[in-house]
Amino acid sequence: MVDCIFCKIAGGEIPSKKVYEDSSSFAFLDINPRNPGHTVLISKKHVQDIFSIGESEAAELMKALRRVAIGVQKASGTKGISISQSNGQVAGQRIPHIHFHIIPRTDAERGMGLEEVLPVKKQDDASMYSMAKKIADGIPGEKIAEEEPSEKATEEQEAPERGPKPPGKQDINFDF
Amino acid sequence: MAGQVNDCIFCRIVRGTIKSWKVYEDKWATAFLDINPRNPGHTIVVSNSHHETIMDLPEEKAGPLFNAVRKVSIAIVNGTDADGVSIAQSSGASAGQLIRHVHFHVIPRFSDQDAVSIEGILPIKKTTDAERSEIVKKLMSKIPK
């Protein structure tokens, strides 16, 4: 695409600190790093977001994402890596070309993931049920076949565990 | 189901031992509503087999896992009032990973809320050109072929 900064970076028209490239993906250092090693991964083909990308293109991008994440972790020496991908201006996407941020995280920043920063908005059971149905109905492609009845019956008889949770684990309420 | 761990919450959700609000499952991945949603429709997508982080996930499973993330994202914007989605994936405690089974958060986003992203929250730490060249070299040598 003509005016896209990421297309220009992938095409070499705009210089970048490239760290990885394959037939469909390109990764380079973010010029405004949140930590040393902060890398941006893009598809070489101009695709706006996750809603527009094809299945096989998405698969190739994800393979590259995994490789680059491994490289970023090893090179940065940190144990934590945050991966962020925003779709839509409302999600903070500034450049309309699909991209992933791969950010090394230090222990000093512990806990600051997007899901930690956004406040929780508890939903009641009815809302959860209705929402799950809406999403399930909206999934494109074939739906999974139902499980064998005998297998399902056995699994439903087991009660969810309510033992003490290890410190630091997510507090999950199973009172559905 | 093969490849699972007994005391992992997400493995048990995949198996159905722990109840969840499932929205999708296939041979590779399972998606269910987060019970502490940041917005209605906030969904977690996990690999069916147990791997702690994206680095531990075998390459051939990466594509199918992300395919589930892609489908769930489409379903969220088509099926709910969301105007966009944020995808977040954390590896390691210092990135905020609490459950050590690789998972993606798919968080619906709305136009009447702050358009914050994780890279928008974290402060910028500028680097010099020399530092950047050094980092590039290190990275390139560590990325698997």
Image (cartoon, coloured by chain):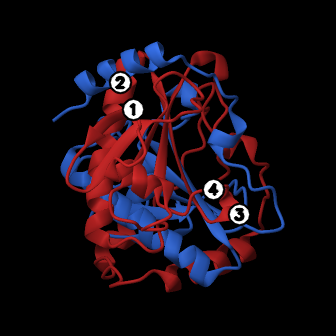
Q: Check chain identity for marks 4 and 1: say if they share one.
A: yes
Chain ID at mark 2:
B
What distance separates the C-alpha of mark 3 from that of mark 2?
Answer: 32 Å
- Could you tell me which residue is drawn at 44 percent across and 13 percent down? B130
Nearest the viewer among A12 and A119 is A12
Q: Are marks 1 and 2 in contact (CB under 8 Å)?
A: yes
Quarter of the view holding residue A111: top right
Which subunit holds the residue at mark 4?
A
The tag on residue A94 is 4
Same chain, marks 1 and 2? no
Say which amino acid is labelled 2. Answer: Val
- Identify the residue under disc 1: A17
Q: Is residue A4 left or right of B144 when viewed as pictured?
A: right
Q: Which disc number belongs to residue B50? A: none
User: Tag 4: residue type?
Assistant: Arg
**Residue pointed to by mark 3:** A90
Mark 1 lies on a secondary structure that is loop
State the quadrant of the C terminus of chain A: bottom right
Q: Give the chain ID for the blue colour.
A: B
Screen quadrant of the N terminus of chain A = bottom left
In the image, which is nearer the foreground, mark 4 or mark 1?
1
Q: CA distance from mark 1 to mark 2?
A: 7 Å
Give the mark nearer the N terminus: 4 vs 1: 1
Quarter of the rendering containing residue A47: bottom left
Evaluate whether residue B7 shows in this view. Answer: no
Q: Which residue in the rendered view is the most extreme toward the right?
A: B112
